[in-house]
Amino acid sequence: MRGDYGAPEFDWSILEVPTPKAMALGQLGFSWLELAGRLATVTQEEFLQEPRPGALNVVHRGAERTPRTLGTGEWVAEWPEGADEPGPRTIAWLVAHLTEAYLERWEWTFGERQRRREDAVVHGDVHLARAELASTVEAWREGVESVPDDEFMTVGLSQATEIDAAAPFGHLVLHMNRELIHHGSEIFVLTDLYRTATP
C-alpha cells in the first residue's frame, strides 16, 4: 500500500525478537500499517463528515462551536469542555487527536520538552492531515526504537504528564499503542458506516 504521505513499512522479523520493546514495537508497527491503509482511502468528504450535527470536528479558526480548541494555524480541532467528555467525533477530529497525542509524547520524551498538545499543527485537508499524523507516528516509533532494551522500563523517561513521569516507559508505549488501536477502530467504523449509507 502506498499513500500520498509515504508507504508504511512493517518489519515482520520483529515478531521473532523476545523482548518487551520488540513486542511493543511490533504492536505499534502492525497497528499503524492497518490504520494507514484505511486512511489512504479516506476522501475529503468522509474526512469532515459529521456522524450527527454538532459532532466534534476540525474547522477554520473562528468557526469553532466549542469553548476550547486545539491547534495552531488556520485550522483548529474543536475540544470538549471536559477532558473525557463523550460525544461523536469526525475522522478529522480523531486524526487531529492522534497527532497531538503523539506529538506531545515525542516532544517530552525525545524532543526539547517545550511544545504541548495545543501546539500541534491541525489540518482540514485530508492529505495534509494524514501526512502530519504519519510523520508524528514515525518520529515516535523511531524514538522508541532508539531506547536500549535495558532502558525500556526506565521510570520517568517521558515527562509529558505526571503519570508518564512516574511510570516505567514501556507502559507509556503500550498506552500510545492503545490510543492508536482505539481511535483507529473508530475511524474504521466511521468509514464503514459512511460507505454503507452512501451508494
Image (cartoon, rainbow, N blue to C red):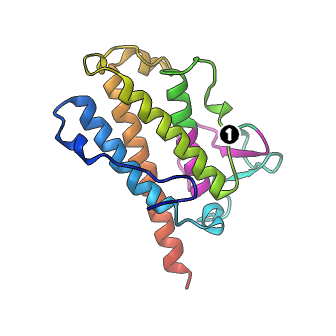
Neighbor class of circle 1 (other Cα within 10 Å; few <14, some 14-19, many 20+) is many
Q: Which quarter of the rendered picture does the C terminus lie within? A: bottom right
Residue 186 lies in the magenta stretch: no
Give whichever of 26, 71 is nearer the camera.
Answer: 26
Secondary structure type for disc 1: loop
Residue 85 in sight in this render? no
- The stretch in magenta equals 73-99
**Which quarter of the picture shows residue 83?**
top right
Please name the residue shown 66% across and 32% down the image: 118
Give whichever of 31, 66 is nearer the camera.
Answer: 31
Residue 79 in sight in this render? yes
Which residue is labeled 1 in the image?
Answer: 121
Percent x, y of residue 63: 81, 51
Q: Is residue 83 above or below residue 65?
A: above
Q: Is residue 96 above or below residue 162?
A: below
**Which quarter of the picture shows residue 178?**
top left
Q: Which quarter of the rendered picture does the N terminus lie within? A: bottom left
